């Protein structure tokens, strides 16, 4: 997973806040937030694009379906984990941030699936 290979983690203190200040002389809240979002989830977006290109260039749509299934199952298992461990001492330190990041990954994947469907229709 490239998310962890780039020294990111599923904790809020592992966000690389310095990415919000790259290439600007003054701080712009919207631009800084967008840069932080791209720094945190950019590899997921690139991975989504690469799976889409590989799937449709090699005429293997099952690869695209499997990628979507993997994201849904990861989020589903995180929901089960958080619901079972909701009274655990470390729920807000470990399980809730992992659930939040998994949810954002799933939203990005669903958005990518919708974009690919709309591109294939038109």
Image: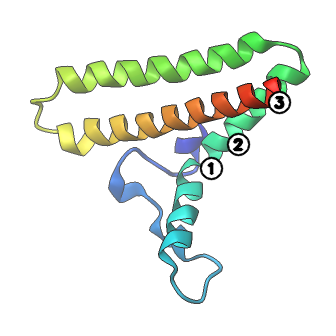
Q: Earlier in the sequence, mark 3 or mark 1?
A: 1
Rendering coords of residue 24 (x, y %): 61, 83
| Marking on residue 16 | none
Question: In percent of the image, x 9 and y 30: which residue is there?
Answer: 87
Q: Which residue, given by chain and number where applicable, does mark 2 sit on?
A: 46
Residue 98 shown left or right of residue 72 in the figure: left
Q: Which residue, given by chain and number where applicable, does mark 3 sit on?
A: 53
Question: In percent of the image, x 46 and y 67: which residue is there?
Answer: 17
Q: Residues within 10 Å of mark 3 (few under 14, many from 20)?
A: few
| Marking on residue 42 | 1
> In this picture, is 113 found above or below 18?
above
Q: What element does badge 1 sit on?
A: helix
CB atoms of marks 1 and 2 within 8 Å? yes
Rendering coords of residue 61 (x, y %): 77, 13
Q: Cα distance, mark 1 to mark 2?
A: 6 Å
Identify the image quadrant of residue 21.
bottom right
CB atoms of marks 3 and 2 within 8 Å? no
Q: Cα distance, mark 3 to mark 2?
A: 10 Å
Identify the image quadrant of residue 81.
top left
> In this picture, is 27 found above or below 89?
below
């Amino acid at each position: 997973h490239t998310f962890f290979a780039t020294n990111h983690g599923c904790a809020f203190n592992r966000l690389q806040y310095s990415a919000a200040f790259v290439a600007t002389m003054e701080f712009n809240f919207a631009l800084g937030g967008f840069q932080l979002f791209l720094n945190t989830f950019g590899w997921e977006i690139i991975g989504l694009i690469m799976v889409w290109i590989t799937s449709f260039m090699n005429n293997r749509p099952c690869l695209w379906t499997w990628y979507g299934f993997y994201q849904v199952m990861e989020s589903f298992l995180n929901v089960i984990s958080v619901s079972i461990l909701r009274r655990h001492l470390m729920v807000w330190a470990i399980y809730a941030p992992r659930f939040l990041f998994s949810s954002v990954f799933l939203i990005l994947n669903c958005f990518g699936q919708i974009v690919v469907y709309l591109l294939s229709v038109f």
